[in-house]
Image (cartoon, helix red, strand yellow):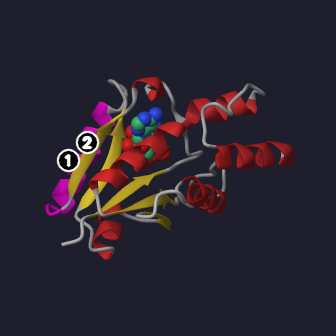
Amino acid sequence: MRRLAIYPGSFDPPTLGHLDVAERAAQLFDEVIVAVGVNSAKSPFLTDEERVDCLKECVKHLPNVSVDSFSGLLVDYVRSKSARSVVRGLRATADFEYEFQMAMVNRRLASEVETVFFMTKWEYNYLTSSIVREVATLGGDFETLVPGPVAEVIHRTLRKR
Ligand code: ADP
């Protein structure tokens, strides 16, 4: 059986921490789909399309990783792809409570789906999308925090403002 994992998230914007998790998941699974959660009630920093497009650029060196978007319940999307694994990342302390809760709820909703956690790398422990948004919006140097294709999209977004 092909081992397919879904790596869902907001990725608003994608960071080096996200990319690192995708790269490591690609080594453990036969196929990984990075799935951008689309929520029409929220107004994201980068549009849905921008997030999908720049993620595609970021993972193009990984032949078994693709990018998609989804709305609605994660477990419904996971089932629609006939996947059994969800990949998530964990940074020290801050993520645990929320990630634990989501994994528990998802297991209740779909007991065949297993959530697999990748511990962040030391250097990405304090790296969050919201920090990148804040640094970028306030004119700071965000380029060392995100992959190149993401930096380009952020520059474009800032110029449009
Ligand atoms: P969500 O809004 O679904 O939490 P995010 O885009 O913030 O989506 O994150 C997606 C996943 O990537 C989450 O599991 C999050 O914990 C993980 N993640 C985010 N930043 C990092 C990082 N620096 N290192 C490792 N994992 C991370």
Q: Is residue 152 above or below residue 144?
A: below
Residue in view at x 38 percent, y 55 percent: 7
Query: Where, by quadrant of the figure, is residue 159 drawn?
Result: top right
Residue 132 in the image: state x and y as whole percent.
62, 33
Label 1 amino acid? Answer: Met
Residue range corresponding to the magenta coloring = 96-112
Report the quarter where the C terminus lies.
top right
The residue lying at 68 percent from left, 28 percent from top is: 135
* Mark 2 surroundings within 10 Å by alpha-carbon count, few (fewer than 14), some (14 through 19), many (20 or more): few
Expressed as whole percent of the image width and height from the top left, the position of residue 115 reads: 24, 51
- Give the image quarter of residue 77: bottom left
Question: How many C-alpha atoms fall within 10 Å of the one at disc 1: few (<14), some, or many (≥20)?
Answer: some
Q: Secondary structure at mark 2?
A: helix
Give the residue displayed 27% in from the left and 74% down from the top. Answer: 82
Q: Is residue 151 visible?
A: yes
User: Which label sits on residue 10?
Assistant: none
Residue 116, given in percent of the width and then of the height, sits at 24, 48
Q: Which mark is residue 101?
A: 2
What distance separates the C-alpha of mark 1 from that of mark 2? 5 Å
Q: Amino acid at mark 2?
A: Gln
Is residue 48 left or right of 104 when viewed as pictured?
Answer: right
| Residue corresponding to mark 1 | 104
- Say which quadrant the N terminus sits in: bottom left
Split into quadrants, the picture shows ligand 1 in the one at top left
Task: Check residue 52 for magenta coloring.
Answer: no
Front in this rendered view, residue 7 or 12:
7
Where on the picture, by quarter, is residue 57? bottom right
Please say if the residues under marks 1 and 2 sit with CB atoms less than 8 Å apart: yes
Q: Is residue 161 above or below residue 76?
A: above
The secondary structure type at the circle numbered 1 is helix
Q: Is residue 45 shown to the viewer in this render? A: no
